[in-house]
Amino acid sequence: MFASKWIYELMLFIYGVSIIGYFMDFIKSNNRVNKLSFYLLCIVWFMQTIILYNQTFIEKNFPILTLNDGLFFYSWVLILFSVLLNHFFHVHFVVFFTNLFSFFLLLLSLSINAMTGSYDQGSQFVHEILVIHITLAIMSYGFFTISFTLALMYLIQYYFLKEKKGLNWMWRFTDLGKLDAYSYFSIVLGVPLLLIGLIFGLVWAYVSKAEFYWFDVKTIGSILVLIVYIIYLLLRILKGYRGKPISIYNCAAFLWLLINFFLFSTLSGFHF
């Protein structure tokens, strides 16, 4: 399997980009993003189909006899259903969450397979999962930081406009509408990155048998950070929050992010 490890890494990368696209389309319907995500999903399914064909007809081993093979086949079935749902019924809600679960199954299958295969390559693959977990989490924090900065700029400019205090450098802040929109878009990008990063972390912890993972304070804090920003999206999309109220919430959410990153990291059992 891991003689072609790069194929599995490429497949996970394409699948991850597809999920981010589906998330963006789920938040705000975008036909172009949906089509791109659909094509990427088809590529992932095609790559899985080739692997299953080789295992079933070349190696004469139908992929349901072991846990990791069953997970891989399960993921293939879910992706097939997602492709059909997206093409014929356009049920975006179901497609996004089905693919999220399928991505978890695929990653878990490949990780278990890695640990039962070549020790060196398996250990390297699991280590790469940890690296991806950390990278995606930090990238999401970067987007949340940009969103916070824009929200803070919004509140500052809102204050000066309300007080009718004209400053020569106010034009550098751009208008309130753009600040609000860009801040929102940054969170739309940050949430799926953190979500996928947590999935990588969960699979890494399971495969590497890390101790106290679920009860680790940094893990709990990271999950709460994700929940806090999901609530932001719900307030904005379902409740219609805009401008000052959602910017204040954004700043409070970023404060929790800082607490999780700096304080909880020092209390964690295995996070830095």
Image (cartoon, helix red, strand yellow):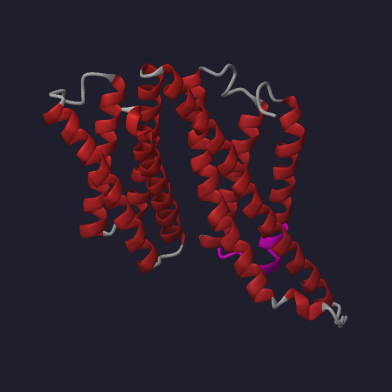
In the visual, does 85 lie left or right of 169?
Answer: left
Q: Which residues are magenta?
A: 239-248
- Report the residue at 20% width, 34% height from top: 52
Can residue 249 be seen at all in this image of the molecule?
no
- Report the residue at 41% width, 27% height from top: 111
Q: Position of residue 114 (x, y in %)?
A: 39, 24
| Image: 80 above or below 189 | above
Q: Nearer the viewer, residue 40 or 216?
A: 40
Q: Position of residue 72 (x, y in %)?
A: 29, 31
Can residue 170 be seen at all in this image of the molecule?
yes
Q: Is residue 227 magenta?
A: no
Image quadrant in which you'd find residue 4: top left
Q: Position of residue 262 (x, y in %)?
A: 76, 37
| Image: 137 above or below 155 | above
Q: Nearer the viewer, residue 164 or 37?
A: 37
Q: Quadrant of the C terminus?
A: top right
Q: Is residue 247 magenta?
A: yes
In the visual, does 215 lie left or right of 31?
Answer: right
Number of labels in the image equals 0
- Report the residue at 53% width, 38% height from top: 132
- Report the residue at 47% width, 22% height from top: 123
**Dominant secondary structure of the magenta stretch?**
helix
In the visual, does 60 lie left or right of 207?
Answer: left
